[in-house]
Amino acid sequence: MAVHPTAVVDPTSRVHETADIGPFCVIGPDVEIGARTRLLAHVYVEGPITIGEDNTFSPYSTVGIAPQDLKYHGERTETHIGHRNLVREFVTIHRGTEGGGGTTSLGDDNLLQAYAHVAHDCHVGSHTILAHSATLGGHVTVEDWAVVGAHSGVHQFCRVGAHCYIGGYSVITQDVMPFSLVVSDRSARVFGVNKVGLERRGFSKESIQRLHKALRRLTKSNLNTDQALEKIRGEEEMDETLQQLLDFITSSKRGVIK
């Protein structure tokens, strides 16, 4: 493997022979780094952590360090990172806590822009974008293809649904419905379906129209959530996408943004 002479690599770490460890990087014990993963410079990695293949970590990113949780007292917890992720400058990813399941995870093909923060016990899916300075509080779940806009904050224990788009500077204190377009100043509101994003990913016009009607029923009618769901089930032709939306809403513990 290519290790710059200024890098510090713990001898107990397991770094693939094709990985590239740049200047002034620090790799602690109990770290596993997969094939062709690159640490460009000044990257700090603390275990226990597994990092997959073809990832790139930009300067001053900090990965797998202890959580900012006063209940954490040094117990063994972990971080798992998948493949082909691009982690930009000053990103912070903290490992889990015993009370939160013990693991923080990041899937595949994600873009974490500069200064993004993934707190303890978060689970980020695949193909997501965390724009610069996007912040996930502890125990947040971000589903596949979601976009969290610049300088947005997601409150602890919230879920961010698949294929949604959170506009910049939003404050998210409840679950964000899949496929929705959400923007807030202080209290987030749904502004419709994430039409452009869904079209780019190949969703049919019919499926997008069904989602549009369902979201209007949920957000624009005078019905409460249970009544709106009953109307949707009774009047709309169900498909896999619409069922995913309804399942997300009915399983929410914090309520959903409307």
Image (spheres, rainbow, N blue to C red):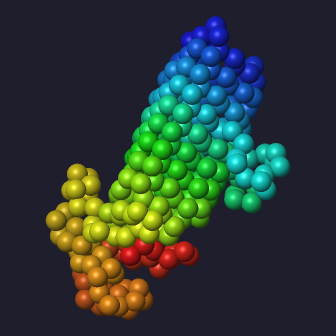
Considering every residue shown, the one lying at the far left of the view is 205
Answer left or right for 53 relative to 45.
left
Q: Residue 24 in the image: x percent, y percent?
A: 62, 16
Residue 82 seen = no
Q: How many marks?
A: 0
Q: Residue 132 in the image: x percent, y percent?
A: 44, 42
Instruction: Please tell me which residue is depicted at 19% across the width and 63% down the height of the picture.
Output: 204
Quadrant for residue 193, please give it: bottom left
- Pick whichever, 68 or 147, lies toward us: 68
Q: In which quarter of the image is the N terminus?
A: top right
Q: In this view, does 193 lie above or below 58?
A: below
Q: In this view, does 223 lie above or below 133?
A: below
Instruction: Please tell me which residue is depicted at 70% across the width and 48% down the height of the picture.
Output: 68
Residue 167 seen = yes
Q: Residue 63 in the image: x percent, y percent?
A: 62, 36
Q: In which quarter of the image is the C terminus?
A: bottom left
Q: Is residue 150 above or below residue 239?
A: above
Considering every residue shown, the one lying at the far front of the view is 185
Q: In this view, does 84 lie above or below 169?
A: above
Instruction: Please tell me which residue is depicted at 64% across the width and 28% down the height of the picture.
Output: 44
Instruction: Please tell me which residue is depicted at 27% across the width and 79% down the height of the picture.
Output: 216
Quadrant for residue 143, please give it: bottom left
Quadrant for residue 188, please give it: bottom left
